């Protein structure tokens, strides 16, 4: 029976508890006609996985494999032609279900169900295998290793929707600010916007992270811990376009007030998270400049396909901060969670479940 990793229930209040990891046994794969069995080669963490261990995420449950990010090789398939065509192919897995192609949001009355660790979806990628609908796969870009491909799905999809769909400003010559560079979504947003021709600027509390971001294509950046950092940022704008067109933000806080100073009239703030708190004031100064604030989370199946195709066509590589190997390596996997707790990572945290090219025993 295949092995996976889930969280184990212990007593404790949400936000104070920290659920331990445990190995669980999955049923032997029995794919339906339109399903495939993917032998997982690598899986990656997201902040939601840390929140699950702290019981701070909706639908937190036990006995469901963790993680939404995964890549692997299709080792078995149901009888349908749509399933059979995937046999032997290296794939990336769509990290959620219930959202086909509506640009406004999920079509499913139950909403969007992300893989890993909740009651909403029984599947997760932190295991030896996952049995999933053939329609939820994309062929992994051939220039990516398994570790790099595993770093792509959830953060890539979130960044794609925020930058390419919601901001509308990923165009040559436009100025885009991405706050809090270092996290997976922010880094993918940098790669997408830069590859689309925009001038990308970043913020961070770490000078080292600012330097790394510039090496990845950022046109400039500032340390948000400095007083008046927004003035320093505006001094970096190109002479022909002295204001920002969009801000891609995952922190919240006072970003609307700051954005009203930095954005052109009609500029856009896209919020994909609020790590500084669940509320964000909308100021009259932003109203007077016709600034839009747009919420953005995850993305549709169509956006996932578009994102993977763009990554392949532009030969983009997700940034990987650190990797550990083996499902049996609970100490190593726990250490990745500690990186996320401390915010020390620059890029994705990945578990290599099986080596590239390893022959399946199924």
Image (cartoon, rainbow, N blue to C red):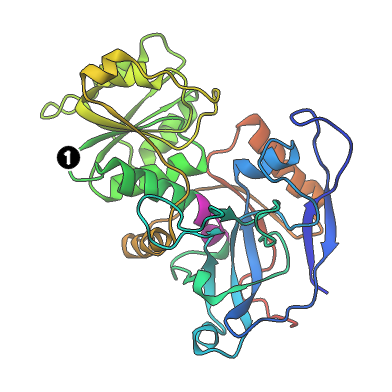
Quadrant containing the N terminus in the rendered view? bottom right
Does the stretch in magenta take in 207? no
Q: Is residue 72 above or below residue 109?
A: below
The image shows residue 154 at horizontal and vertical percentages of: 52, 52
Which residue is farthest left? 240
Is any part of residue 216 visible from this angle? no
| Helix, strand or loop for disc 1 | loop
The image shows residue 76 at horizontal and vertical percentages of: 64, 84
Q: Which residues are magenta?
A: 147-154
Q: Is residue 40 above or below residue 197?
A: below
The image shows residue 263 at horizontal and vertical percentages of: 24, 24
Residue 276 figure quarter: top right
Relative to 215, 28 lies left or right? right
Q: Residue at x 77, y 62 (%)?
A: 4
Count up the numbered dots.
1
Q: Residue at x 54, y 76 (%)?
A: 134
Relative to 306, 207 lies left or right? right
Which residue is farthest top? 227
Quadrant containing the C terminus in the rendered view? bottom right
Q: Residue at x 25, y 44 (%)?
A: 168
Q: Residue at x 79, y 71 (%)?
A: 2
Residue receiving disc 1: 173
Q: Along the line of sight, which residue is nearer the eye, 337 or 25?
A: 25
Q: Along the line of sight, which residue is nearer the eye, 258 or 219?
A: 258
Which residue is farthest front? 109
Is any part of residue 193 visible from this angle? yes
Q: Is residue 5 above or below residue 10?
A: below
Relative to 335, 243 lies left or right? left
Q: Main secondary structure of the magenta part?
A: helix
Residue 190 figure quarter: top left
Label 1 environment density (alpha carbons within 10 Å; few <14, some 14–19, many ≥20) = some
């Amino acid at each position: 029976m295949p092995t996976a990793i889930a969280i184990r229930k212990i007593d404790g209040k949400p936000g104070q508890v920290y659920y331990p990891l445990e190995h669980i046994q999955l049923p032997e794969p029995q794919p339906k006609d339109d399903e495939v069995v993917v032998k997982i080669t690598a899986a990656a963490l997201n902040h939601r996985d840390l929140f699950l261990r702290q019981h701070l995420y909706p639908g937190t449950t036990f006995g469901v494999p963790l993680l939404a990010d995964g890549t692997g090789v299709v080792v078995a398939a149901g009888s349908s032609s749509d399933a059979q065509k995937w046999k032997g192919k290296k794939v990336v897995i769509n990290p959620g279900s219930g959202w086909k192609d509506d640009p406004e949001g999920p079509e499913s009355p139950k909403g969007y169900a992300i893989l890993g660790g909740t009651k909403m979806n029984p599947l997760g990628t932190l295991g030896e295998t996952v049995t999933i609908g053939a329609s939820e796969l994309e062929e992994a870009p051939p220039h990516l290793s398994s570790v790099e491909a595993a770093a792509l799905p959830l953060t890539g999809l979130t960044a794609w929707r925020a930058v390419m769909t919601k901001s509308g400003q990923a165009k040559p010559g436009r100025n885009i600010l991405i706050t809090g560079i270092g996290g997976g979504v922010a880094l993918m947003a940098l790669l997408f916007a830069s590859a689309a021709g925009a001038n990308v600027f970043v913020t961070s509390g770490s000078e080292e992270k600012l330097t790394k971001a510039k090496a990845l294509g950022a046109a400039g950046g500032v340390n948000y811990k400095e007083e008046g950092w927004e003035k320093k940022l505006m001094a970096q704008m190109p002479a022909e376009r002295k204001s920002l067109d969009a801000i891609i933000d995952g922190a919240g806080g006072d970003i609307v007030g700051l954005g009203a100073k930095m954005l052109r009239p009609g500029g856009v703030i896209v919020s994909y998270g609020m790590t500084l708190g669940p509320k964000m004031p909308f100021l009259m100064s932003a109203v007077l400049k016709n600034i839009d604030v747009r919420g953005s989370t995850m993305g549709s199946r169509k956006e996932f396909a578009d994102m993977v195709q763009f990554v392949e066509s532009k030969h983009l590589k997700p940034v990987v901060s650190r990797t550990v190997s083996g499902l049996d390596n609970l100490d190593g996997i726990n250490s990745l969670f500690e990186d996320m707790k401390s915010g020390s990572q620059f890029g994705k945290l990945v578990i290599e479940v099986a080596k590239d090219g390893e022959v399946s025993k199924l």
